Image: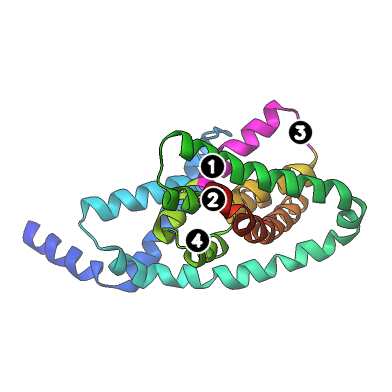
Amino acid sequence: MIARLFGLWAHLQELPVFWLAATLGVFQFSSWLARRSKGFPLANPVGLSILILVLILYFTHTAYSVYFSGGQWINFLLAPATVALAVPLYQQYGRIRSMLLPLVMTLVFGSLVAIGSSVGISQLLGASPSSVLSLAPKSATAPVAMGIVEKLGGISSLTAAVVILTGVTGAMTAPWLLDRLNIQRPAVRGFAMGLVSHGIGTARAFQESAEAGAFAGLGMGLNALMTALLVPLLYHWFA
């Protein structure tokens, strides 16, 4: 009986559709846990899903390449999902124009703080110059952050890991922190979450409202652009 179960697992393990179904199932389970937690900040569906899937792959000795054979179909949807953010942005066009100055000021200040904090902390902890560079664009979306680091000679794999960690951490803690600060305006909450925690924060903002999600998408896109401009300009200061 046990031998049959192992044989069945070995067969399922090689099926891309199994890992696609497993990813969707784990996310649904994590979403259920998040709802049952009644707003507990650490019960973020994305963060829980990543943790559960990592544990499954680790304890079943499954290579990431095997998992990604099914997970790639979800990854494929990221591009059209990102483009689709243009729809809620267009619907909020009037609000965006009326708030243009504070949005630009917040963008510049937020980008500088995100870059400066990661560089300063990593240098204080004795990180190598290549590691410091790899951490600098942590609040930009992954493709932009990795592209910056690759061009400047950093460690792109470290950047990818830190970007994901930043997104998950921001999505978990930002709503709780904004509540503690009594910041309730959807536009402000959304822009802050998108600016500091890119796509994962944007997804979390959409759970609050369409307006918050639209401004989060705006924050994510503008911060990617600002980070791409600032990191190369400031590179010689921390290289």
- Secondary element type, mark 2: loop
What distance separates the C-alpha of mark 3 from that of mark 2? 24 Å
Amino acid of disc 2: Lys
Rendered location of residue 83, percent (x, y): 67, 71
Give the answer, above or below, for where 69 lies relative to 200: below
Front position among marks 2 and 4 = 4
Q: Which residue is mark 1?
A: 118
Magenta segment:
166-184
Front position among marks 3 and 2 = 2
Q: Which residue is at a point 75% across and 53% down the rendered structure image?
A: 215
Rendered location of residue 66, percent (x, y): 28, 68
By what rule are the colours in the image chosen?
rainbow
State which tag comes first along the sequence, 1 or 4: 1
Callouts 2 and 1 close, C-beta under 8 Å: yes
Front position among marks 4 and 3 = 4
Q: Quick check: 227 left or right of 29? A: right
- Residue 183 numbered tag: 3
Label 1 crowd bin: few (<14), some (14–19), many (20+), radius 10 Å: some
Q: Which residue is at a point 24% across and 71% down the rendered structure image?
A: 14
Q: Quick check: 214 left or right of 56? A: right
Amino acid of disc 1: Ser
State which tag comes first along the sequence, 3 or 1: 1
- Residue 149 numbered tag: 4
